[in-house]
Image: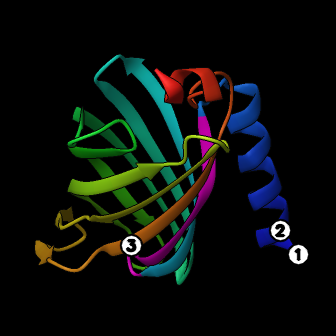
Amino acid sequence: MKKLIILAAFFFFFKVGFSQEVGIRFGDVLGNNIAVDGIFNTGKLNRLHADVSFGDGVGVELLWDFLYRPLSGEAFKWYVGAGVSTLIDDPFWLGVSGEAGLEYRFNKIPLSLSADWRPTFYFIEDTDFRSGGFGINARWIFGSSTASSTDVDK
């Protein structure tokens, strides 16, 4: 029940906080296996990528995708970023994660699918490097981020 309340609060936070995309991430998320995922655009070609993960403790990541570019067409984009990661558990972990991924945005529906890799270097509780962090994301896009049928025909 506690995890359900945290999950609902996180969705509410992202919706009220004017996120452009909200969804779910499956895979290795700071040692957990599922996360609520949100995107906040900070410019035309960069964005903030936030996650709250659940499993063995609660993980929180805030990554800045400083490169977010189209890849041979308007539906595919690639991104690279870095940011802070923490796992609130016993022991407490704090570190820095990198991110590299590929995203597909559907033209007719407000949905994006992506796959990425997030290696993490921890420096608090112990010094450790985790090269895992592969995940798949499915996010709902809010606002006018999707292409309309007239944009596709041009």
Which secondary structure, mark 3? strand
Amino acid at pointer 3: Gly
Check contact, mark 1 vs mark 2: CB within 8 A.
yes
Q: CA distance from mark 3 to mark 1?
A: 25 Å
Is residue 143 shown left or right of residue 39?
Answer: right
Check contact, mark 3 vs mark 1: CB within 8 A.
no
Which secondary structure, mark 2? helix
Mark 3: few, some, or many residues within 10 Å (few <14, many ≥20)?
Answer: some
Q: Is residue 36 or residue 112 the one in the foreground? A: 112
- Residue 154, image x, y percentages: 46, 20
Mark 2: few, some, or many residues within 10 Å (few <14, many ≥20)?
Answer: few
Magenta stretch: helix, strand or loop mostly: strand
- The numbered disc on residue 135 is 3
Q: Quadrant of residue 134?
A: bottom left
Residue 30 forms part of the magenta stretch: yes
Labels 3 and 2: the sequence-earlier one: 2
Image: 129 above or below 148: below
Amino acid at pointer 2: Leu
